[in-house]
Amino acid sequence: MEDKRLERTLFGITFKNPVGLAAGFDKNAVLYNELANFGFGFIEIGTTTPKGQVGNPKKRLFRLKSDQGIINRMGFNNEGIEAVIKNLKKNKGQVVIGGNIGKNTTTSPENYTEDYCEVFKSLHPYVDYFVLNVSCPNVGSHAKLNDKDYLIELITACKELNLQEKSQKPILLKIAPDLNTIQLDEIIELVNETNIDGVIASNTSTSREGLKASKEQLAKIGPGGLSGQPVKNKSTEVIQYLADTSHKSFPIIGVGGIHSEKDALEKIKAGADLVQVYTGFIYEGPSLIKRINKAILQQS
């Protein structure tokens, strides 16, 4: 769906429309050229880690049909940087590509930054923007990744690498929907202190509140990140809080429970500049993208 009125320019990139595909769907950058045909304005590949890893044991992906949600504990399964670069070299240039990056599960805490930097440097020529994935609940030992001092260290290291390149790529931070207002205030401070380019709100949730699925069913599934309709309101509240409290001082990409045009417009009204779908795309199918863009045009 091509329409100039859908274009959005953020952190120096022009997106042909504001509807993107969230990370985790095309982990190894295998399908982005084909997915671009569905009308996405941007596609985020990854999460990519330095070395390939198998992730958590299967079964690790569960549909909560009655809740229109998904629980996953994939564990950053991906083929590693080299495989992803090989696939990104086939880019036909139809769509903006984001690179969602993380650390290997076996990496010890003192080497976390090294992992992120390695992927950042290697992927730099092949993606249009970066996302530091520090909020995924499916990866062990991520407590340190939510520590503000550590995040300043990580962002600073990536920014230094960025400055060594001919052209700089925007860097965004993906945050959890489970943060309280004190933690969200810290995120706003972090953005101001580091001048990071924006925030993606939000990742999957560890909460199981208010689900239709039975306690037995949830116990059988076990741990993992919850996505889809059950996180919709939580994610919108995080966007609203960040936008209002910061006086909209940085770009926000809104993701979490977008299953309809109405859901997407709610995120935009709350303060999201762009939106991403994942679980909604699985449940509703590819027509969702065009429907959202149409609804945005009707509002403009």
Image: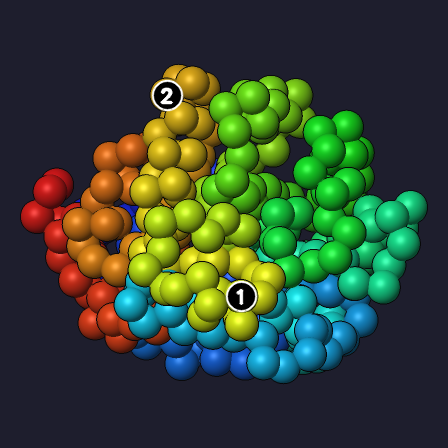
As rendered, which of 220 and 115 lies closer to the eye? 220
Q: Mark 1 or mark 2, which has the lower sequence index?
A: 1
Can the viewer see residue 296?
Answer: yes
> Taking 283 as reference, is 137 left or right?
right
Does residue 255 show up? no
Residue located 46% across and 52% down the image = 208
Task: Please provide percent x and percent y for residue 29.
Answer: 56, 75
Q: Looking at the rendering, which quadrant does residue 148 occupy?
A: top right
Amino acid carrying label 1: it is: Ala
Residue 277: x, y in percent?
36, 60
Task: Please identify the residue farthest to the left as the structure is shown.
Answer: 298
Residue 244 bears which disc, if any? 2
- Residue 281 appears in which quarter of the rendering? bottom left
The answer to the question of whether label 1 and label 2 lie on touching residues, with beta carbons closer than 8 A, is: no
- The label number, if any, that marks residue 219 in the structure image: 1
Q: Is residue 187 above or below residue 199?
A: above
Q: Secondary structure at mark 2?
A: helix
